[in-house]
Image: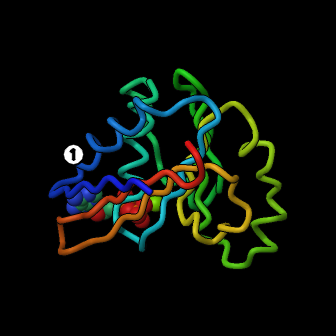
């Protein structure tokens, strides 16, 4: 399975990596973000949203308290954050199927918490912090795409 690895040293560089990923996303894609708190998942999502064609003046916030934010890019973007949900049953209760199976692009923070609920094909992105500013971003396709 092909994995592409990036290393960034500033939030701006992480935005750029996200933007590059976002440009390649297609309608219906699911992006599963995995990595600790503060590693840069929301920062990467901001870049992804830009790459999907979101207006530069539209701010992508962490949806930690809302769970799902919707943005209008060239295709809708659903930004989902499972930080506050620990148990699989709580996630099942959200009824995310309509988002996952719809034509929008889903970007999910803490996606490892719903691994069993992810579709057959998705883009997995693992982020890790090496020091205060250095981040590794591993992108791989799970499934056939
Ligand atoms: P998460 O969503 O994973 O909890 P955030 O994107 O909200 O993380 O926050 C990442 C934090 O790390 C921000 O405070 C950001 O300024 C900082 N940071 C430092 N270096 C980087 C980097 N290379 N890429 C992304 N964020 C970085
Ligand atoms: Mg976040």
Across and down, in percent, residue 14 comes to 27, 49
Q: Is residue 67 left or right of residue 25?
A: right
Q: Is residue 92 left or right of residue 127?
A: right
Across and down, in percent, residue 116 comes to 72, 68
Residue farthest bottom in this picture: 87
Check the image and report above or below for 116 versus 138.
Answer: below
Mark 1 crowdedness (10 Å alpha carbons): few <14, some 14-19, many ≥20: few
Across and down, in percent, residue 141 comes to 49, 51
Check the image and report above or below for 89 versus 14.
Answer: below
Q: Secondary structure at mark 1?
A: helix
Q: Is residue 102 left or right of residue 34?
A: right
Q: Residue at x 32, y 59 (%)?
A: 137
Point out the image quarter for the N terminus: bottom left
Camera-side residue of 13 and 119: 119
Camera-side residue of 61 and 104: 104
Q: Residue at x 59, y 39 (%)?
A: 29
Q: Which residue is mark 1?
A: 12
Quarter of the figure with residue 72: top right
Q: Residue at x 58, y 25 (%)?
A: 75
Q: Is residue 124 left or right of residue 139?
A: right
Point out the image quarter for the C terminus: top right
Q: Residue at x 58, y 36 (%)?
A: 77
Mark 1 residue's CB less than 8 Å from ligand 1: no
Check the image and report above or below for 83 versus 43.
Answer: below
How many numbered badges does the structure rendering display?
Answer: 1
Quarter of the figure with residue 76: top right
Colour logic: rainbow
């Amino acid at each position: 399975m092909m994995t592409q690895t990036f290393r960034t040293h500033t939030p701006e560089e992480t935005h750029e990596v996200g933007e590059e990923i976002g440009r390649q996303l297609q309608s219906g894609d699911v992006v599963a973000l995995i990595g600790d708190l503060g590693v840069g998942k929301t920062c990467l999502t901001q870049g992804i949203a830009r790459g999907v064609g979101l207006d530069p003046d539209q701010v992508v916030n962490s949806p930690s308290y809302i769970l799902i934010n919707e943005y209008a890019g060239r295709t809708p973007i659903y930004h989902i954050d499972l930080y506050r949900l620990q148990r699989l049953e709580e996630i099942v209760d959200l009824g995310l199927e309509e988002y996952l199976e719809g034509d929008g692009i889903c970007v999910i923070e803490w996606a490892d918490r719903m691994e069993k609920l992810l579709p057959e094909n998705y883009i997995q992105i693992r982020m890790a912090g090496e020091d205060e500013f250095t981040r590794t971003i591993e992108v791989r396709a799970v499934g056939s795409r």
